[in-house]
Image (cartoon, coloured by chain):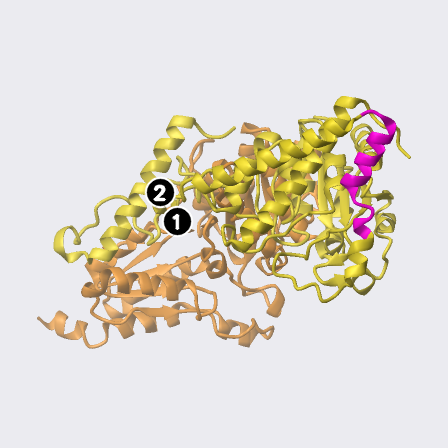
Amino acid sequence: MTEMRMREALRDAIAEEMRRDPDVFVMGEDVGVFQGAFKVTEGLLDEFGHKRVRDTPISENTIVGTGVGAAMAGLRPVVELMTVNFSLLALDQIVNHAAAIPYMFNGNVRVPMVIRMPGGGGHQLGPTHSHSFEALYLQVPGLLVACPSTPADAKALLKAAIRDDNPVVFIEHESLYGIKGEVPDGDDVIQRFGEAAIRREGADVTIVGILKMAQVAEKAAAELEEKHGISAEVIDPRTLRPLDLDTILDSVRKTNRAVIVEEGWPHGGVGANLSTLITEQAFDYLDAPVQRVTGADVPMPYSRRMEQAAIPHEENVIEAALATTEGAFPRKRQD
Amino acid sequence: MAKVPDRQICLELLGRMCLIRRFEEEAGRQYQRAKAGGFLHLAIGEEATIVGTTSVMRDDDYLIGTYRTHGHALARGTSPDAVMAELFGRETGTSGGRGGSMHIFDGERRFMGGYGIVGGNLPLAAGLALASQYREEDTVTVCMFGDGASNTGNFGETMNLAALWELPVVFLVENNLYGMGTSIERHSAVTDLSRKAEGYGIEGERIDGMDVLEVRERVSHHLEEVRTKGRPSLVEAFTYRYRGHSAADPEVYREKSEVEEWQRKDPIESFIRLCLEDGVLGEDDVEGARREADEAVEAAVKFADESPEPSLESLYEELYVVSETMGWYAVDERSPEPHRGELGEDAPEVAKNLAESGASHAEEARERQSREGVRE
């Protein structure tokens, strides 16, 4: 184990895969000379040179499309889009091309590429640089969607994404780049897609959190235990497509309550989707309606005060967890 | 005027152009009979641009096109049976019935697909060319698109990137004078599209896309320039489609006389005249080419008609590659394993069936993977 920041874990993942496979290369805006807008690609240009670490013009749709074409010819591009908001400029290539091509050509060609994009709020970047589009990408058949919340997962998932033969949308959270964590040593530690992590075991309520909200959920769970005597199980799905629904359902069948936490918008969100899946497949086990904690239904405001109000915090998660358990525990605990 | 090539080449050019013409006419007929669905974009009138181009490409060069590419696949050597079967939505089609008329693909012949989004294939072409450059191969990508695509953001982005990175692409505009129903002077501020190359510092040339020999000569020149100098170029082939944009086009935007005027310059008839005058081909050869095209297309319709519909069990196949890094997928997010607490009656029947079908897809895909190995 080595302690490192998430950005370093991501960089190591890319560097190790580039050393392992000469077909892996990186391209994106300012990934080379500038060393990456968020310094994830720092040092890669020095080691691998301009052929494999390619600075591009600001042309999102063409950056992704060029990656798709290169992947169709057998290379393994790791494309960086500077933020998830900018990825909307490439939505045509991501949805109409990368995701559709393998299927529409009947598996006669594959698109083994990774599209990395950081998002999320908290840095006062306002309504064009702060959003969370996990729900948008999770909707698209043909894509894999990763959303790591720890340095170890970030590294192991990115390595799996690069080795995988499907197009992967790899969503990172800007606020997590600096967090530190223990990362297993070794070039071949990969995290398979579709395997959730149980971050904390509990008996009374299941809290599912993604990206930064996995961490918020963990903190909220600690406080629920401490202040309210409620034992929360915290699950981080790690990937949204495929989704490890089994682990979530197993937990809900045990706790009979669920809270889903995400930073994205409420309508048609990750929580809306997961809440439906839980209701469809574990309805009989639920003792309370599934609760969602989401970002506010507005474009992200700039003002620090307003922005913080638009992003979920521990207290919102605690409130939602209490709502699912309201009236249940005092009786249960008196027994 | 370009020199008339030898007999073998003339027969080849004539044969391919006749095949495309005949195929497209028949596709239109089959569409009216509702054998082919969706949209149907026919390339009748554009045969010389297509065949002239493919006839000078190497087998290992990449070709990528638009939603009007039945002919491009045929010109590349794809069997008319498989293309017609794709129009019919059959299992034996080039895309197994998943793509349809707009999405023909033949990777074996490096026809890297037809694409339904105007301008969507341009970045893909840059990517294919990047792969050639990356591997230090001297293959060239020919990217064909319509005049309408020259107004998209992708055009500007991709031309810039390709010029900047010196990617080996011949960008070939099939300028048929209309972006769907909007004529070029109503859709493009600069109507000489070859001049759009200037903004990217690359060579641009306008050619007569109705003259198969001129297309051959000029595209051949550009292919070799790109191959040796490693810089993209832009070729604008002036051509015309006799039919509407798609089969669902009432053609209110143009006069019949305009169509007739272009038909007088018909690429096939004028090539036949030239060959007969030159003596390189005789009437027998022309008759033979037409008969062969008739027979091939008749056989293609029969083949498509007799081919099976895709099985519904295959609906989820080919969506994902199941492998070590992604072990399974299922429509309802269930894993193939039994689920705690819902073995037996407590699983609703529908959900159980869904889970089982998901599991079987994953299983089949996994088996296929281990049989065929992961694609290199």
Which residue in the structure is indicated by mark 1? Answer: A242
Nearer-the-camera pick, A328 or B30: B30
Question: Left or right: B240 with respect to B105?
Answer: right
Q: Quadrant of the N terminus of chain B?
A: top right
Kindly identify the amino acid type of the residue bearing the numbered disc 1.
Pro
Q: Is residue B19 visible?
A: yes
Mark 2 Cα shell of 10 Å, populated few (<14), some (14-19), many (≥20): many
Chain letter tied to orange: A
Amino acid type at mark 2: Trp
**B58 w.r.t. B317: above or below:** above
Q: Does the magenta stretch include residue B81?
A: no
Q: In which quarter of the image is residue A228?
A: bottom left
Q: Give the range drawn in magenta.
A: B262-280
Mark 1–mark 2 Cα distance, whole angstroms, equals 8 Å
Residue B372: % across, % down: 42, 27
The residue lying at 70 percent from left, 59 percent from top is: B180
Residue that label 2 marks: B328
Give the number of callouts: 2
**Is disc 2 on the same chain as disc 1?**
no
Q: Chain ID for label 2?
A: B
Please state the chain letter of the residue tagged with numbered disc 1 in the rendered image: A
Location of residue B105 (image quadrant): top right
Residue B189, image x, y percentages = 84, 62
Is mark 1 in CB contact (under 8 Å) with mark 2? yes
Q: Is residue A105 visible?
A: no
Side of B104 where A228 appears, left or right: left
**Left or right for A196, reference B215:** left
- Taking depth in this image into account, of B264 and A251 the one nearest to the observer is B264
State which chain is coloured yellow: B
